[in-house]
Amino acid sequence: MLRIGQAQFDSIRRHGEATYPDECCGVLIGHVEDNDNIVIDALSAENTRSDSAHNRYHIAPQELIRIQQQARRRGLDIVGFYHSHPDHPAEWSKTDLEEAHWIGCSYVITRVSGSLTGGDGDALRCRAMETNSFLLAGMGEEDKRLEPQSIEIADVVGAQ
Amino acid sequence: MHIHIPTPLRVYTGKQSVVQVAGNTVSDVLTALTTKFPELRKHLYTEEGKLRAFVNVYLNDEDIRYIVQQENAPVKETDTLSIIPSIAGGAPSSATSSSTKLLTPEEMARYSRHLILPEVGEEGQLKLKAARVLCIGAGGLGAPLTLYLAAAGVGTLGIVDFDLVEASNLQRQVIHGTSDIGRPKLDSAEDSLKAINPNVDIVKFPTRLSSENALEIFENFDIIADGTDNFPTRYLVNDACVLSGKPNAYASIFRFEGQASVFGTKEGPCYRCLYPEPPPPGLVPSCAEGGVLGILPGLLGIIQATEVIKLILSAGEPLIGRLLLVDALAMRFRELKLHKNPECPVCGTHPSITKLIDYEQFCGLPSKSDAPAALVNGIPQMQVEELKRRRDAGEDLFLLDVREPYEFAIAQMGGHLIPLNDLPNRVRELDPKKEIVVQCKVGGRSQMAAEFLAQNGFEKIYNLAGGIIAWSEKVDPKVPKY
């Protein structure tokens, strides 16, 4: 199970809307408790895939190192990642599985649906739809798999 | 020095997030780490001993791949080494994702009838512009398919075809004109498509689609539209679509009937769920043998184009899990439900086909890469050149023509006519002691006839490879091709 506070849950969905039609991405930090990933904070990251940001994301390793250091200072760990699928279901894609290497972490995906509406200066309108979480299970690269994981929205002690 | 271990690898370091090891270079330190925790090795290195592509190793804040000395870079006691598996991914394909690019005024005018449809609109038109569709074949189905996809504004159209335009194509392949006879179909198609819509990027593949090149060609496309006329390529396209996770807008035609569906999606069936095995060679005649109503590929190709556009727009109900049957003579459309077969060898839950195979062999045909087969199902194959040589030498060969009378009336090469279906009743007309060469239009029906005769005690039976068409092409051009 993934346990996350309402504020953190909302913030990852708002992030997806803010970057639409590009994918957003970020890191979930917290701790592991009885096989549950508990999210204390959701940190947005920059999507470095400027070549194809509408359907790819990548977090720069330097940014990950910074986030990891920041988490460590707070006594926390990286427990998951999130990204958005603009105009695509919140299901993991082949690319998502191939590029997922953090076994034990949660991969949270939000569908953001939008439309370019004419008339008022082609305003970009979009809305976060469903959000799903998948646990990267397995022993290694050979047998890794993304398994659906329930999300519990609850007040998480220590969340900010 | 300190090495920071990421969460997923801590199971191999006894849950330690920071490991203290000694060494003078990055390489020393990593070796010390994997000696201390041997389980880590296979997670960090490939079998060849190279760092896995997705594993980043940072010395302080520098990627060691970009430090001049790389793994031999010296390290100090106060340095920090971080192991960071990469974080990346993305939505399934760009075809159905929005593009930030905008339409030009010329495109606004061109696509205005799309733009005022709420189901398409500017967003949909941008999706069409970003879409990359690969059409297999620029023939009967490929002609209307590519013409309409280009007109609709599909941004990138790939076409695979290696044929030249022939006179017999013009009755249905409306993308080619009379003056194109003898030109590569790809060049002729490109001219027609560019004339309709110069914005379309045409990518030409002047090659035969094969197990060697299919996945590589498919890689740069989002949707595949199969307009092929033969079983080996149809199974090849199906399997390559399933393996690469790309939908296949499929149609096929025969005489007055056609069928269409969308195969190869994650949720739906594939062509093999419908037909696990191909029919025996020769049982289903090709259009060249059986004929086809010229308008029929127009009808079916446009159904394919419609499905492609719907997939790109994520609009309406795709033909996934449904087989549309079209009967042009009765002008009736029927629909069959198709189910994904969990036992399917390619898209089932435990697939036995995980890479592309030899599809000629799978369909019971001699492999294209080999020299002409000497034997097919036990029947010796005679090449037209050999028949000519032996006829010229005055040898007593009996030529049995198993085509239909109306074909015989169009062209013949001196054979004795017994249509394939009459053969069982008229077998007594033949002398089992003579050497008999069986011939049809291109060699499919004659192979079946030869196998029938062999089973009925005839011992000296040959199949004429390539039939009367090969005879016309290689020996006697005065015999008309039809």
Image (cartoon, coloured by chain):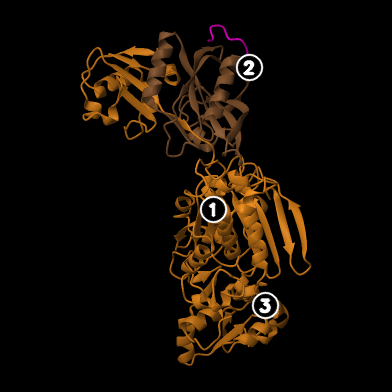
Chain colours: A brown, B orange
Q: Amino acid at mark 2?
A: Glu
Label 3 – label 2 distance at C-alpha: 70 Å
Q: Chain of mark 2?
A: A
At label 3, which amino acid type do we have?
A: Leu
Q: Quadrant of the N terminus of chain B?
A: top left
Q: Residues within 10 Å of mark 3 (few under 14, many from 20)?
A: some
Residue in view at x 51 percent, y 45 percent: B102
Q: Which chain is mark 3 on?
A: B
Q: Is residue B143 magenta?
A: no
| Majority secondary structure of magenta residues | loop
Question: What residue range appears in magenta?
Answer: A154-160
| Residue B480, above or below B355 | below
Q: Is residue B242 visible?
A: no
| Residue at image point 45% right, 87% down | B389
Amino acid type of the residue that numbered disc 1 sits on in the rendered structure: Glu
Give coordinates of residue A92: x percent, y percent.
Answer: 56, 33
Image location (x, y in percent) of residue A110: 58, 28
Q: Are marks 3 and 1 in contact (CB under 8 Å)?
A: no
Q: Determine which residue is flagged by label 1.
A: B107
Label 2 residue SS? strand
- Separation of residues labelled 2 and 1 (CA atoms): 47 Å
Residue B18, picture quadrant: top left
Tell me which residue sits at (43%, 13%) in the image: A71
Which numbered dot is residue A152? 2
Q: Gap between marks 3 and 1, in whole Å?
A: 56 Å
- Quadrant occupied by the C terminus of chain B: bottom right
Q: Select label 3 or label 2 by which is in front.
A: 2
In x, y percent, where is residue B2?
Answer: 31, 13
Image position of B223 (left or right of B75): right
Tell me the crowding category of disc 2: few under 14, some 14 to 19, or many 20 or more residues within 10 angstroms, Cα based: some
- The tag earlier along the polypeptide, 3 or 1, is 1
Q: Secondary structure at mark 1?
A: helix
